Image: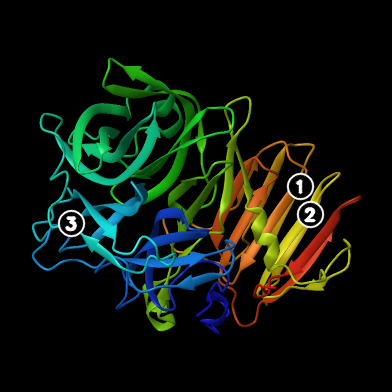
Amino acid sequence: MSLAAQCTDPRAPRFRVRPPANWINDPNGPFRWRGRHHLFYQHNPDAPVHANVHWGHVSSADLVHWEHHPIALTPTPGGPDEAGCWSGCVVDDDGVPTAVYTGVDRHHTGVGSICLARALMPEDETLTDWRPLPAPVVTGPPAGLDVVMFRDPFVFTHGGRRWAAVGAGHADGTPSVLLYDCDDLTDWRFAGVLLDGTDPVAAHAFGDGAVGWECPQLLRAADGTWVLVLSLWDGSPSSTGYLTGRLIAVGEDGLRFEARAVGRLDQGRDFYAPAVLQEPDRALLWGWSWEAREQAEVDRAGWAGVLTAPRVVDVRPDGSLRVLPAPELELLRAAEPFVTAAGTPAALPDAYDLTVTASGRTGVRLLRSASGAELTVLVDPGEGTVTLDRGDWPRTGSEGAGPIVVRAPADEVRILVDGSLFELFVGDRAMVTERVYRRPDDVAELLVTGAGATVSGWELVPPTHG
């Protein structure tokens, strides 16, 4: 079943990855195999709540037409993952796709183990059958570091060897990324701390709020710069950050990350736990966008969470991140645009792809409420700012629904809307992910104002295949 056909709820994203019903959170193990992209995700198949964690699974030949597959990983009664198959990655282990994930047993105390599961039929491009190994390859954190949070292994290659980064938090409140040598996936050796919260670059940018770093991800940019992506945990999911720099050898058997630049990965309030896929010519990234509405509404809807559109990530000469929607997303555009000129109101569909270029201060109105409130994006190239103002559209969460101001020298924004999922790209310099729930009496209408502004917008439609 295609994602676009699975739900008639106008708030439900139809073109992004999510299960037909119930819960989704972290993307896991994006992986390219036999011409298809595979994407796994944290999934409760029984209810729209965060519990009973399995690995859901979809795949695509073009990054836009996703097909559902049977659940890939299921907790094993009496096994090391009995209380959940939590986040991790997928790697090619000598021709066998292998999931490397966090297992939690019945005595769960916040510290997981590292488990493996192998594809039973590697020759099958759909990779629908997986078998977990009976015992974890790492039973818990290394002794002597007082680790109280240990999860989310990510395997990468450096210097011709395989290594793994593991998210951690220590009893004194210091977050860290632990490093393992795992050249042999069944034989792991602790190789030290890759980076921790005492690093001056990280401390200056992230502050001391995070007590653990989740879902560490590493990618190598086109110029050889390394990017370390972190999800900042402060007792609950918080926000995401990145550091760019280089990997430095420590003796003969270790590495450390030397940070050069750092920043907020996504400027929005509804984005967490991104996963990356290193391809030969680019790096792709997906994130999880949670529900920013009351649980009672979620229960009535019967679904919770969605993965973002895939994003291409690279590094600028100054070390800052460069990020754009994957070009394959243009396959979702209708044959003809629904708007090509500024200044005239145009009805907005439930899902669209919109680009606005500003030569001066430019307003982009997207929603009007019955009370007269507006949801707007203000682009001000002179000030070097883009402001998202949600008006009176509510959201749950401690940060409320106030305006978001992005400071970036950009004169163009691209806005991807799919049901309640709102993704704003400020040139190629910043991204903002928010959930905006349209109400029955709201009017979805585009109005772009500003001298010299240009606009192009396409409705999203199910992709066709020739």
Q: Would residue 333 be found to the left or right of residue 111 on screen?
A: right
Residue 298, x across and y down, in percent: 41, 76
**Mark positioned earlier in the residue sequence (3 or 1):** 3
Compare residues 190 and 49 and report the one nearer the observer.
Answer: 190
- Give, as a three-letter code, the residue at label 1: Glu
Direction right: furthest residue: 452
Q: Secondary structure at mark 3?
A: loop
Q: Quadrant of residue 117?
A: bottom left
Residue underneath mark 3:
133
Residue 399 visible in this rendered orientation of the protein:
no
Q: Quadrant of residue 217?
A: top left
Alpha carbon of mark 2 to alpha carbon of mark 1: how far? 6 Å
**Mark positioned earlier in the residue sequence (2 or 1):** 2
Residue underneath mark 2:
356
Residue 19, x across and y down, in percent: 43, 73
Q: Secondary structure at mark 2?
A: strand
200 in relation to 150, above or below: above
How crowded pointer 3 is (Cα within 10 Å; few <14, some 14-19, many 20+) is rated as: some
Compare residues 389 and 326 and report the one nearer the observer.
Answer: 326
Image quadrant containing the C terminus: bottom right
Residue at image location 26% in from the left, 37% down from the top = 182
Residue 328, x across and y down, in percent: 65, 58
Q: Quadrant of residue 421?
A: bottom right
Residue underneath mark 1:
412
84 in relation to 319, above or below: below
How crowded pointer 1 is (Cα within 10 Å; few <14, some 14-19, many 20+) is rated as: many
Alpha carbon of mark 3 to alpha carbon of mark 1: how far? 49 Å
How crowded pointer 2 is (Cα within 10 Å; few <14, some 14-19, many 20+) is rated as: many
- Give, as a three-letter code, the residue at label 3: Leu
- Proximity of marks 2 and 1: CB atoms separated by less than 8 Å: yes
